[in-house]
Image (cartoon, coloured by chain):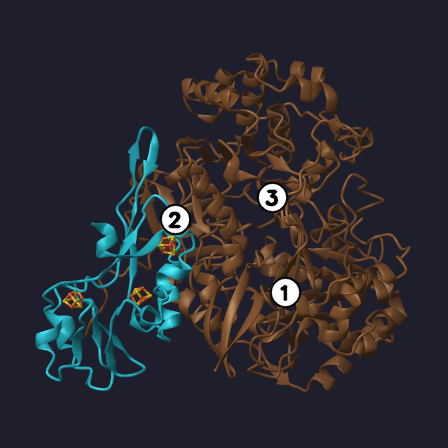
Chain colours: A brown, B cyan
Amino acid sequence: MSETVWSMCGMCSVRCPIKVEVDGNRIKWLEGNPHLLGGALCAKGSAGVALRNDRERPQQPLIRDGGRGAGKWEPVSWDTAIEYIGEKLDIIIDRYGARAVMLSCRGGPFMDLFKTFIHGLGSPNFTNHDSACGRNVHHASLSVYGLGRKGFIYDIKNSKHLVLFGRNIFASLRIAEANQVLDMLDNGGSLTYVDVRQSLTGIKATRFFQVRPGTDYALALGMINGIIKADAYDKEFVDRYTTGFNQLASFVEPYTPEWAAKECGIKAKKLKDFISEVSEQAPQVIFHPGWMLSRYRDSFYASRAIHILNVLMGNIEVKGGQLFPKGPGDCGVKGLRSLDSQVPKPEEKRADGVGWKYRHFDKGPGLFHLFYDAMLTEDPYPVKGVICYRHDPFNCFPDPAAQKEALDNTDLLVSIDTHYSEFGWYSDVILPESMYLERDSIVATQKGPKPRFIVRRKAVDPKFDTKPAWEIFKLLADRMNIGQYFPYNSIEELWQWQLEPTGHTIEEFEGKGFVSLADEPIMYDRDNLDGKFKTPSGKIEFISQKLADAGLASLKPYESPRKAPKGNFRLIFGRSPVHAHGHTVNNPLLNELMPENSLWINKRAAAKLGISEGDLVDVISASSIGTIKAHVTEFIHPEAVYTVHGFGRQVPLQSRAYHAGMSDQKLQSGKLMDMDPAGGGLCLCEVFVTVRRSTKNPKRRVEL
Amino acid sequence: MNKYLIYLNAKRCIGCHGCEIHCKVNKNLPVGPYLCEISHEPLVAVKGVPKTEFHFRSCYHCEDPYCVPICPKNAMIKREDGIVYIDEEKCIGCMACAGACPWGIPQYNPETGKAVKCDYCKDRVDMGLKPACVTKCTTHALKFVTMQEVN
Ligand code: SF4
Ligand code: SF4
Ligand code: SF4
């Protein structure tokens, strides 16, 4: 007899809603939630079953035996592991104070648990991976709207034109969003794709701008100029809701479409055609402001310019534009009760300097990489304990060797994860979390035009001696005598506690896996959006006072990207739809689909180097070398080479992924502290490499 | 007369290879055999946009299959509705079918030691459901249609 369990996927950070059919303790079938996704799931989603059956994941708590990274582990009980961590934390807190402990995660809807733990300890140092991901976009959004990156959702399905600056939307793959884009295209919409190479997304585009790497900002400025000159912006909206338009207009004066086309290496006519097209289609035009824009020196300003383009289109709170995400409050329902809100806010300054040294950055998660500075210099104070939940800084931030140097000044490294991460391999304790089909999670809110509460439910019992996060943090909290902040003994009690103010019960999730809070999409009155923009002026700020206070320009004059030194290429990285960064490279089925990455290199550049399709090439940076197969193509800019992020892993127990492919972050030497001072994002694409045909090419082997 | 067909709307397919894994997981296949495959031609610039389209290939469920008569154990069977499937009980894993099929469609399953191939998920179809690859296609690009609908 099979039983239906409504849950949430956990293979990547999108966390699609799923429906699982279970027979006893066996997964018979899993698909995307039919009510929300019509059954659709991606390759990773289905391969969750292979993750469950995979023995190459931590099967019980492990304590390091031998040097860090030596790979010798003592399997221990949960009691022993928790006590071990507790004793270490006691010593650190005793010597350096609770602030010497930091905790990082990868964001998402379940952060309440982790924040509560670290704040409950008395440390302000909660952080996440985002300085190597979306911080530039987030801070750019804050500076324009006073709202973060998630301050708008995009009604792509109903738009007439979607413009993507390097956002490879079909490879980064959020299923619902991908379907919206395809629906828009089916309805005759336009898709403009800007990138240094052609991608899965670009092949569906109606227009493709292959730009010189690092010139996105120039292109956006040229577009702003063209739109203002053509009088194609929404004057009424701009007058009513923005400040600084005149400064913007005079600032972009020199950045004509002709200038931009030249700078980006595209045809001016094509850019002008684009400008006329969007002028006609406004306000149903969405300029996607980017996601992972920790890339170039001016990515913050590029993102800011893209946010401004949206404002000029007047696309806010219109069908087919950017919509304010609605929450429980908009439906007359109280929000979920939060654990973290019961904890007194730690008074201490953050060790990463965010909020006091860097006042223009969002204090919430701060900036992880700046903690490395504190570890090395003990300024503003020592950081001695690092807990990473589901986050692998070595796979995420540049230059793992430099990271290790900083971490060698710490006394405790804990990795809580379902799989062996590179950081986990270097840490002192691994606490294995049950994989997502084996665990319940706390109730989460999903904002949108039709907001909902959603929950992950355990479908099958854990195969190994692993535990869910809600229990792991409860155990840690009890050991640290802060159990009062985790007022539950079971997940049912926790759900009830969370849901209590909302008036809903967990039983209501049983029919469809979620509780919808609105039947129809909720729209605000577009003529009365006052108070919705949380900037100091309450308006959309083309010129931001907050940036000025930090000594930063709101509109930064354009500087051409550095030219690669002779014989060098800019190393660009991206995503594939079959992997979620480094999380899935060892999954048996996904590894079979894509066991390693390749190096895209321009045809002419390759010819000069004597490199042919499929040749092994050495990719060389100042500190590292990677060897992978070349993919020779005319569809990448000659100044760039490209690879998929997440490969080249060095955890021996992951036999399939071990040393397969090349790690881009290991090639990003010296980049750990190379931060965009305005956006806080790391400059991960400001890396130059040389490429040569590898001597490892199989030729003239001795055979007998 | 074949009753069914899997049709790919190439305009929607994004080449995510989801279908290949949906199929493998549904059939509980180990690393090795793939019962369907997504492929594409090299990119060609069309009006300034480098383009290509994806193709989906499973089994053709031939009207007059080569794989059926070659099987020494009569394990390869063509149903009334056209579905060509393998009776696992009878299959001895000799792989004569793969040799006979012009496209080498039947695959060897190293875990069972038998041949395995696309059977249009007949167990699901017989329950009134769609095949796994169609049900879970990331973008609803795959359709399971009857010949009647096609005509
Ligand atoms: S799952 Fe659908 S969209 Fe993805 S490759 Fe297969 S047919 Fe194409
Ligand atoms: S296996 Fe080959 S021969 Fe047999 S039905 Fe399929 S395509 Fe035809
Ligand atoms: S119909 Fe079933 S067996 Fe055939 S390719 Fe699709 S999922 Fe696989």
Task: Provide the secondary structure element on which disc 1 rests.
Answer: loop
The picture places residue A222, in percent across and down from the top left corner, at 54, 21
Quadrant housing residue B45: top left
Residue pictured at 77% horizontal, 31% vertical: A547
Q: Are marks 2 and 1 in contact (CB under 8 Å)?
A: no
Q: Is mark 3 within 8 Å of ligand 1?
A: no
Chain under disc 3:
A
Q: Amino acid at mark 2?
A: Ile
Q: Which mark is residue A294?
A: 3
Residue A652 seen from this side: no
* In this view, the mark in front (2 or 1): 2
What's under tag 3, amino acid-wise? Ser
Along the line of sight, the residue nearer the viewer: A228 or A328: A328
* Amino acid found under the numbered disc labelled 1: Arg
Question: Residue, x 51% and y 70% (percent of image)?
Answer: A20
Tag 1 residue:
A390
Q: Are marks 3 and 2 on the same chain?
A: no
Query: Between A368 and A453, which is closer to the camera in this rendering?
Result: A453
Residue labelled 2 has its Cβ within 8 Å of some atom of ligand 1: yes
| Disc 1: host chain | A
